[in-house]
Image (cartoon, helix red, strand yellow):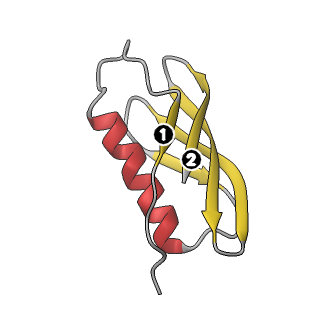
Amino acid sequence: MLLRRRDQDAARVVYALTLHLPDGAIEGEATLHRESGRGELSIEGAPDWLSTFVLALLRQLWTSRRDPTATYPHRVLRWREAKD
């Protein structure tokens, strides 16, 4: 799973999202709302367990950067073994 920051402002942080699956990569977008910490995914074909993982990761990023002036990482790369 790779997040690459596309945009960041006072209200949200937008990441390009790439999920590397056994059958190939799929791409989409992940948005983190800075005020609430709510994440949104716009990606087709993502397994539920992986979507849940990405949303939890976005929440973790938000928890560590609650200051409204905080800068979010440009790139986040994580690996998780596929769940059956």
Mark yes or no: residue 44 visible: no
Mark yes or no: residue 14 visible: yes
Categorize mark 2 by other alpha carbons within 10 Å: few (<14), some (14-19), many (20+).
some
| Rendering coords of residue 12 (x, y %) | 52, 28
Mark 2 lies on residue: 2
Hey, what amino acid is under mark 2? Leu
Mark 1 lies on residue: 76
Of 13 and 83, nearer the camera is: 83
Q: Which of marks 2 and 1 is nearer the N terminus?
A: 2
Categorize mark 1 by other alpha carbons within 10 Å: few (<14), some (14-19), many (20+).
some
> Considering the numbered disc 1 on the image, is that residue within a helix, a strand or a loop?
strand
> For the point 47% across and 35% down, which residue is it?
33
| Rendering coords of residue 31 (x, y %) | 56, 40
Hey, what amino acid is under mark 1? Val
Of 37 and 53, nearer the camera is: 53
The number of numbered badges drawn on the structure is 2
Q: Mark number for residue 67?
A: none
Judge left or right: residue 27 versus residue 3.
right
Judge left or right: residue 55 versus residue 14.
left
Q: In which quadrant of the rendered image does the N terminus lie?
A: bottom right
> Considering the numbered disc 2 on the image, is that residue within a helix, a strand or a loop?
strand
Asked if the residue under mark 1 is in contact with the one under mark 2, i.e. CB atoms within 8 Å, the reply is yes
Residue 59 found in image quarter: top left
